[in-house]
Image (cartoon, rainbow, N blue to C red):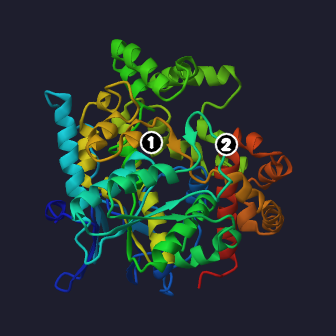
Amino acid sequence: MAAALDALEGDYTLARWDPRTGTLLLAVSPMSSRTLYWHHSPQGTWFASSLALLFRFPSVPRIPSVVNIAAHITLMVLDPADTVFEQVRHVPQGSLLWAGPDGIHEGTIWRPDPSKRLRFRRNDDYVQAARELLDHAVRKRLQGARPPAVTVTGGLDSAGLAATAARLLGDTPLDTYTAVPADGSAAPISPTYYPDERSPVEELGTRYPSLRSHFCTSTELSAFEKDPTPLFLAGGRAVLTTSHLGWFDPLYKAVQAHGHSSVMVGTMGNFTLSFDEGLIFSDMLRRGRFLSFLRLFPQVMSYRGRRARDHLVPTIGRAWPEMRAVRRRILGRSSKEWKGRTYVRPDLIEQIDLEGLADRWGEEGIIANNADSRVQRAHFLHNQGTRQVETLTTLRAYYGLDLIDPLSDRALAEFCLAIPPEQYVIDGRSRSLARRVLADRLPPRLIDEPRRGQQNGHWFARLSQQKDIFAADLAQMEGIPLVAGILDLPKLKSLIDRWPADAQEAHARRLHYESVLSHAIQIGRFLRWVDGGNGT
């Protein structure tokens, strides 16, 4: 069965009941944007396409998993099939499950394989092959009665998808949607980001007249930033990035208002076509490619507007994690980097042995201590990709939109994993493969832009509007044992007490405020919701 499903193309979930054997088969396609949740007990097996739907069955228990919630807060993925609830699992992408008289059996259809290798004689051969795969991936997703909407930025991934779709559709109109800051409120320009993506998107529209560009903005908080209960009701789980999602809320509402049922996104491009240099140079050092490193590292850093010496030590540290661990100990820091970003109670970390679990499931070993860029990307594509799919499931239910991502196409992902890592920096430019592949369809300005568009540039202003709400939430959470037993509430309160004076000060602490604090608050709100019995 696994072999037959492996040969089946498409983004699918499958459920098949065999009355002769009393066996249920559940399957999810490789690199899918969908999932299936399930619960099994001696009384039977229940399954649904979202947690919210699964919990409509009275027989399915709703018991929070302390271990998986702690991992979720820490941005770890332990077992990709686990959820934040005990006795409830899901079928990850590229997986299947049999449930029958002899119990449950979980199996694999396909996984990203970092051991595969693909080499061509000329650099241009990689470009041509990638173009064909990209065209095929987009073409497959344009087969509906109406073309999907496309979310577009000034970056390579989404702009490349819009350009590819426009070329394939000819004169057929294609609606694109871009989130931009309100007039006159652009975030300060930094060396690595530009503040407003309107201009490059307009230039893309000039090249392709069939593109109908829509620019969406709002200075107000979205409804779910103030009260995320509707997201909990839609997906049955916490969505951590509500502040970032609030930036895109006007965009998705515009897509809805214009009658679209699906929207094309480029979420997984960072791990496929437009993979950047972050791990490539550590990979080079680890493999002894010193001459290539000495030639390309300064070029790429210069292209990105960075000083090579500022990034040399971290790059060496990723190549030889043993040296990095020694350096962190000398500086008085934990050798476990995730401990610096978690807001789980320290006593709970010890009690559940989160450190041992991270080691057991490879999260620490792969993310922090492995310089092989292929291994890391394969890990992200499956493990972190599984969590991304869960978020898409919630958004699909909340907005009523089918989110499709051609850059998660299996054939494209396999190709991008198998080619030599140097192809991503071969000409001294970051994201070199994407720039060369898309040069036949994007304006030179977009191809040559070394910076990235600033998304949610006013994140601090959005969070500051919620500061008092956050403080009240934390005070209330102290009286909820489920929440207080997991979150390090005093540590979170200290972030409120030491609130940055302005956006510039906040920028240096963005990880702790936009990511960690915001994520922890959403987890706390979710646990409060579950504890209050509001899941029904």
Q: Which residue is mark 1?
A: 362
Q: Which residue is mark 2?
A: 188
Q: Residue 106: x and y, percent? A: 31, 63
Front-lying residue, 266 or 519 = 266
Other residues around mark 2 within 10 Å, as few (<14) / some (14–19) / many (≥20): few
Q: Quadrant of the C terminus?
A: bottom right
In the shown orientation, is residue 125 left or right of residue 437? Answer: left
Residue 281 appears in which quarter of the rendering?
top left
Three-letter code for the amino acid on which mark 2 is drawn: Pro
Disc nearer the start of the sequence (1/2): 2
Three-letter code for the amino acid on which mark 1 is drawn: Gly
Disc 2 on helix, strand or loop? loop
Front-lying residue, 412 or 524 = 412
Q: Residue 530: x and y, percent? A: 64, 75
Whether pointer 1 and pointer 2 mark residues with C-beta atoms closer than 8 Å, the reply is: no
Tell me if residue 340 comes above or below residue 52 in the rendering. above
